[in-house]
Image (cartoon, rainbow, N blue to C red):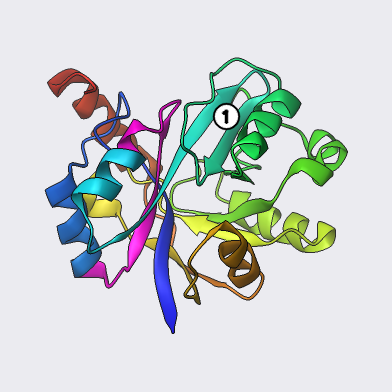
């Protein structure tokens, strides 16, 4: 059976996210998603909490970790990985938990801190997958460059909306075979199809500013 997953979603557990469990469930039903990866900034509590609260959805607990060299997503996490570590140390901490290392939006050149193509090649042995379709890179050519780079190095491809508000959940997703554990996820990802379209990064930025003004992270 094939399933649809948005593999990059931020919730109320991110300082700039507004997605609560009810909003996520409604968004997934509206967009035909079977689940998401919850990847809050430097925090795995959101993924663990949502997995417990939403048994009808497949929730992969994860985190988008701000390493000293740029953002790195860890999937299938059980504990926080602290921010500010080097990229190799961050990846090692993810793998120590049996997690999956994903590089999000690798060629969004507007980001001030990100790893170069040279650095990604140096760390290729520690990277499990590359996000080739992100919902809101500010550099329009970022997704195309990421897809070509992933293909050239043989990285499995992921895709995610990078949603911070429920309206954007599922605008980008991966269609893949059903899996039951980390190993099954990686095997299925090799034959996954990424789908969706880029949406306005500026609309997302407004959502994030609004979330910061309205509330504190749990």
Q: Residue at x 65, y 52 (%)?
A: 130
> Which residue is depicted at the point 65% across and 35% down?
96
Q: Quadrant of the N terminus?
A: bottom left
Q: Nearer the viewer, residue 151 or 52?
A: 52
Mark 1: secondary structure:
loop
Q: Nearer the viewer, residue 25 or 78?
A: 78
Tell me, yes or no, if residue 191 can be seen here: yes
Residue 98: x percent and y percent?
61, 44
Residue sitting farthest toward the bottom:
1
According to the picture, the residue beneath numbered tag 1 turns out to be: 111
- Percent x, y for residue 123? 81, 38
Against 49, is 7 above or below? below
Residue 35 shown in magenta: yes
- Compare residues 93 and 37 and report the one nearer the observer: 93
| Observer able to see residue 141 | no
Q: Looking at the figure, which quarter contains the C terminus? A: top left
Does 168 sit left or right of 127 as displayed? left
Instruction: Reply yes or no: does residue 68 show up in magenta.
Output: no
Residue drawn at the location 77% of the way across and 63% of the way down: 151
Vertical placement of residue 129 versus 69, above or below: below
Q: Which residues are magenta?
A: 30-46
All told, the count of numbered labels is: 1
């Amino acid at each position: 059976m094939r399933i649809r997953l948005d593999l990059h979603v931020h919730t109320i557990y991110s300082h700039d996210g507004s997605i609560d469990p009810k909003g996520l469930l409604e968004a997934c039903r509206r967009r035909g998603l079977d689940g998401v990866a919850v990847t809050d900034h430097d925090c795995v509590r959101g993924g663990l909490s949502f997995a417990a609260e939403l048994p009808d959805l497949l929730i992969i607990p994860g985190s988008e970790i701000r390493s000293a060299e740029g953002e790195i997503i860890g999937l299938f996490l059980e504990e926080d990985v602290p921010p500010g570590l080097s990229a190799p140390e961050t990846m090692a901490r993810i793998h120590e938990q049996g997690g999956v290392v994903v590089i999000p939006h690798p060629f969004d050149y507007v980001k001030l801190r990100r790893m170069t193509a040279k650095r990604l090649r140096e760390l290729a042995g520690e990277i499990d997958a590359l996000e080739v379709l992100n919902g809101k890179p500010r550099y329009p050519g970022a997704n195309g460059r990421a897809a070509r780079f992933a293909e050239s190095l043989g990285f499995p491809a992921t895709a995610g909306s990078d949603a911070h508000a429920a309206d954007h959940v599922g605008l980008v997703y991966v269609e893949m075979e059903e899996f039951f554990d980390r190993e099954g996820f990686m095997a299925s990802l090799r034959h996954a199809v990424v789908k969706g379209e880029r949406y306005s990064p500026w609309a997302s930025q407004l959502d994030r500013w609004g979330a910061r003004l309205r509330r504190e992270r749990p």
